[in-house]
Amino acid sequence: MRVGIGYDVHRLVENRRLILGGVEISYHLGLLGHSDADVLTHAIIDAILGAAALGDIGTHFPDTDDRYEGMDSFIFLRDTVLKVKAGGYQIENIDSTVIAQRPKLAPYISEMRARLAKTLDIAVAQINVKATTAEELGVVGEGKAIVAHAIACLSQL
């Protein structure tokens, strides 16, 4: 077994869509970033890459590369799955947490899990997505950013 940890944070701004776990969330603010800024998917990618000792998302998909500007993070996720499988690993499970003061994410979690599981080529039962608030503390609690953490467990094929 191999375990990796992922983390990501992006600022909330106007005139951007809010995408989390590949799902568009109805909200008046979106996450600022070079790609679609999907913090949940980015944290999961980093966790998977970390478990396989393959670096991080910035190594594989740098924000200095114009090819990735505005890109759907699920393209990065699909590529990460291929890299991990080519390295002789399979994903056993993912556990993740999104920390956002607003909006409420509970209505979207089932869809996030389904989309992520399909792209990761695992069963929905192998991925967990939790949502919590920051209790109005710090930039997340003030509604200025969203954070995500993830842990990935891999096994050798």
Image (cartoon, rainbow, N blue to C red):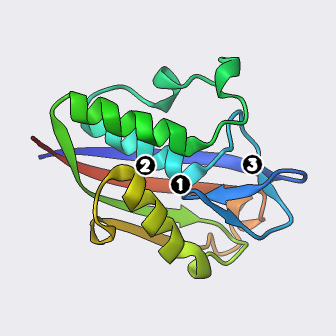
Element type where label 1 sits in the image: helix
For this orientation, the residue located farthest to the top is 65
In the image, what residue occupies the spot 68% across and 67% down?
A: 137
Residue 49 location, x and y as percent?
Answer: 34, 35
Residue 92: image quadrant is: bottom left
Residue positioned most to the right: 15
Residue 11, labelled with which disc? 3
Task: Identify the residue at horizontal 47%, vertical 21% (top origin).
Answer: 59
Q: Quadrant of the C terminus?
A: top left
- SS of the residue at dot 2? helix
Residue on which the image places disc 1: 40
Instruction: Name the residue: 59% across, 75% down.
Output: 108
Amino acid type of disc 2?
Ile
Residue occupied by mark 2: 44
Question: Is residue 49 visible from the viewing direction of this image?
Answer: no
Q: Is residue 38 visible?
A: yes
In the image: residue 119, left or right of residue 136: left
Label 3 near label 1: C-beta < 8 Å? no
Going by the numbered disc 1, the residue's amino acid type is Leu
Give the vertical position of 62 relative to 151 (above or below): above
